[in-house]
Amino acid sequence: MLGRQTGQRSLFEVDFQAPGLVREGSFYRFLASQRGKLFRDEDFASLYHGKLGRPSVPPSILATALVLQTYDRVSDGEATERASFDLRWKLALGVALDEVPFAKSTLQLFRAHLLVHELARLAFERSLKAARNRGHLKGRMRLAVDTTNVFGRGAVKDTYNLLGDGIVLVMRALAAQEGMVVEEWAAQGKLERYLSGSSLKGEANLDWDDAEARKRLLREIVADADGLLEEVRKARGKLSEGSEEDQALLAAAETLSQVLLQDIDRSEAGPSLHEGVAKGRMPSVHDPEVRHGHKSASKRFDGHKAQIAVDTDSQIITAVAVLAGNAADNEGTLALVEASEESTEAEVAETVADCAFGDGQTRAAFAEAGRELVAKVPAMRNRGRFPKTAFVIDLEAQTCICPAKEAGDARYHKAENDQDRQLRGFVFATATCAACSLRSQCVGGRLGRTVQVHPQEALLQKARAFQKSPAFRPFKAARQVAEHRLARLVQLGIRQARYVGRAKTLFQLLMAATVANLTLIAGLEGVPNGQSGT
């Protein structure tokens, strides 16, 4: 049953029993001033039965505790202790000096209910409501969007250990189905080595310079994996399809199967390690949504990507998302803009971003939606030779002039008639290029130069012209607001995922964005941003 926090002040609260010990202007006092405004107990009524059971810990207290936990970057256990003994937390929560407001398990269960019942965004939305009510969000916004990497929670393994982890998952599922402990079940199948140490590869006692020995070990591991998958097929045949036991076996088997598919090549000579990295490779069975990602050619990571939208005037974070680690930065950008409008009740006038968002496809999506995107077009390179941008392309006249002032011949995609044909690019005559004094700077082969026309060439040309003009400078400066907000989120711990999976990592990002917004609002109202002293 829903428990409620009374609006009546108690003589046993911090301000009455220990006045002045919590510093004026601190974030804790700001949260205390928002009691009954930021979170109301009735906001969480759907999580509780209307009549049955004892009154719960007031959910407004638990929601505030999650904000404090993110602000102070503490564990569930530490959060529970601070709620019981820290005067600053007690002031913010509105509990008596001698009160133990909640247990660790209560906080964890509340978080789980928020995720299951799709209330994970409530705290973030309340921070936007607070910003809107205070006039920090205007009627029209200029948004800046950007991403940063988030390291996954699960350990990333090489193929041998990844297969070993997948095998252990399947063994645990099979053992549970038979009511046995996994060690006992593994002993029956002589599979104890997968449980004997922290590293299957390290425990192999193998000469890793011996190619035949490596192949032999891999064959044994793959054979064990195949055998376990066959055991799963037999066990599932005895279960009701879709039952809890059936789903547990299926999930474990699918994880092991994915490792085999992505990392193992099969041939008549036997299994071998896959050359290179498979697209969408899963590097951890314990955090299966982690992916190999990169923010640049040299900056690689294993995890997810945090994507945010920020109002450049107020610096309020208006929308967030968590992408797969191997996703492009620009994935779902339009949805992020639409979410910003919905949550802030303000119109987005334009969206600014870096060149990762400046591709033709993203521009076309914004243009089709009637929205303006300002993003630098990625620079074009051609192995030290003239790039396409060195050529003057007139799409309306369908002409192309090279740096030597020669004209190319237009080429078209195949079509049934002239009305349907589309410009594909331009080709310069071999003889013309052969006699050109600039040939070494332009053409590498024996034939003439070719220049391709992008499907969104007109949008890209317009963007290139704009980014060379003085009018582009304010947008370039505005984009940096998103970088500053990402830096604040990193301060609040989003560089490392606290939980397994993208859904829970999104919850972590939402809470960090909530705190970033609230500390910003508090700062605008005279509270030093981020200060936590007593």
Image (spheres, rainbow, N blue to C red):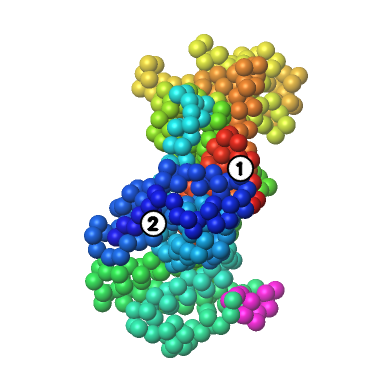
2 or 1: tag closer to the N-terminus: 1
Q: Position of residue 262 (x, y in %)?
A: 50, 60
Three-letter amino acid code at the position of disc 2: Pro
Relative depth, front residue between 29 and 218:
29
Q: Secondary structure at mark 1?
A: loop
- Residues rendered magenta in the picture: 199-210
Q: Position of residue 279 (x, y in %)?
A: 51, 52
Disc 2 + disc 1, Cβ < 8 Å: no
- Can I make out residue 94 in this image? yes
Number of other residues with Cα within 10 Å of mark 2, as a class: few under 14, some 14 to 19, many 20 or more:
many
Query: Disc 2 and disc 1: Cα gap in Å?
Result: 26 Å
Residue 25, label in figure: 1
Give the mark count. 2
Residue farthest to the top? Answer: 397
Quadrant in the picture for the N terminus: bottom left
Three-letter amino acid code at the position of disc 1: Gly
Relative depth, front residue between 458 and 187:
187
- Can I make out residue 144 in this image? no
Q: Position of residue 160 (x, y in %)?
A: 57, 71
Number of other residues with Cα within 10 Å of mark 1, as a class: few under 14, some 14 to 19, many 20 or more:
some
Residue ID at (59%, 76%): 198
Q: Is residue 130 above or below residue 153?
A: above
> Of helix, strand and loop, which mostly describes the magenta segment?
loop
Residue ID at (45%, 24%): 139
Image check: 297 left or right of 37?
Answer: right
Q: Secondary structure at mark 2?
A: loop
Residue 58, label in figure: 2
Q: Is residue 282 above or below residue 440?
A: below
Q: Is residue 48 above or below residue 122?
A: below
Residue 58, image quadrant = bottom left
Q: Is residue 387 magenta-colored?
A: no
